Image (cartoon, rainbow, N blue to C red):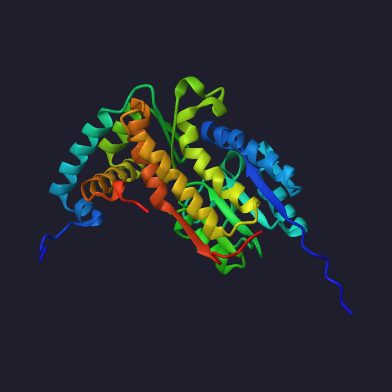
Amino acid sequence: MVWFMPMSKSILITRPDHDLITKYFCAWSNELVDFAKSKMIKVYDLKGKKSNKKKFLSYINIRCPSLIFLNGHGNADIFAGYGDEPMVGVETILKDAIVYARSCEVGKNLGLILVQNGAHSFIGYNRKFFCGYTPEKITKPLEDEIAGLFLKPSNLIISTLLKSNSVQEAHNRSRKSMYKNFRKMVSSTSTFEERYSARWLWSNLHSQVIFGDPLKTI
Amino acid sequence: MNDKIENSTEDIILDPELSEQLKKLVLERVGSMPDTLRMSVGSGELTKDDILKHVEQRDNIGNQVIEMELEFLRDLANGMVYAYE
């Protein structure tokens, strides 16, 4: 008789912090780390310089996380870690994981290839990921309300998945949240900065894509 | 029957005359960006003047901004931004 250990839920987060936007992504990911821990989900947190290819592949191969949250820079074929060192490419195998890439353009090609290589599902963006921010707030990213309009809907993908909802549900909730923010930003009660940056959020809403099994949960 | 033919984004960008008109329009729109706002796109942290330069030079970021503005204007015009679901 063969006994199988039940796979425990776990999340691997890469969050470099070598430039302004990765610092923002890193800071805004804190609440997701805390949330995962509160749900008793194991967190593998590759923060700052730990976001490198060697460590990433080591965690992928040994820990087999069920959810992978990639923060950083990317393009159609490569996702990068700390210092923009390439970390995930078309040869990478992220078997049986749900992947969300908060990055530019990874949803153009790489996301689909990761699914073809064995990932269950992928959410990302097939164009540039735009994010507005307030120059006075760069030392306190979590207090930047403009950035929050872009990053909270993005965080919602991970928090929805951590609550054992499906990939499709996470995608839908995030898009709904972006649209809600968008409507607020173009309303008469918004600030000039909110109204202007609404078009950037509109672009993110339309470039967020999903590949693989939409019904998968972690 | 509506026989209006709408140019695709690619058509506009490839047509020199339309492309130049579009660039001027986008430069005007970017010109109204508040100085108290910044855009992050890729590894770029961009002020209004930075974006204006990218659009003027029609480089990768400039073209992405032009494409984004065009799509937004289209969705505004066809009412999609108010009826999205």
Nearer-the-camera pick, A85 or B3: B3
Q: x and y percent of residue A179 in the render?
A: 40, 45
**Residue beneath the point at 15% across and 42% down:** B21
**Residue beneath the point at 74% across and 43% down:** A37
Compared with residue A202, is residue B52 higher up or lower down, i.e. above or below?
above
**Residue beneath the point at 55% across and 49% down:** A157
Q: x and y percent of residue B63 in the render?
A: 31, 45
Nearer-the-camera pick, A16 or A149: A149
**Drawn side of residue A34 relative to residue A88, left or right:** right
**Drawn side of residue B59 relative to residue A57, left or right:** left
Number of numbered markers: 0
Nearer-the-camera pick, B85 or A20: B85
- Residue B57 shows in the view: yes
Q: Quadrant of residue B45?
A: top left
Q: x and y percent of residue A104 in the render?
A: 47, 47
| Residue lying farthest to the right in this orientation | A1
Q: Quadrant of residue A197?
A: top left
- Residue A50 shows in the view: no
Nearer-the-camera pick, A62 or A178: A178
| Residue lying farthest to the bottom in this orientation | A1
Q: The C terminus of chain B is located in which quarter?
A: bottom left
**Drawn side of residue A87 relative to residue A153, left or right:** right
Q: The N terminus of chain B is located in which quarter?
A: bottom left
Compared with residue A137, is residue A156 higher up or lower down, i.e. above or below?
below
Compared with residue A191, is residue A181 higher up or lower down, i.e. above or below?
below
Q: x and y percent of residue A93 in the render?
A: 64, 63
Compared with residue A61, is residue B39 higher up or lower down, i.e. above or below?
above
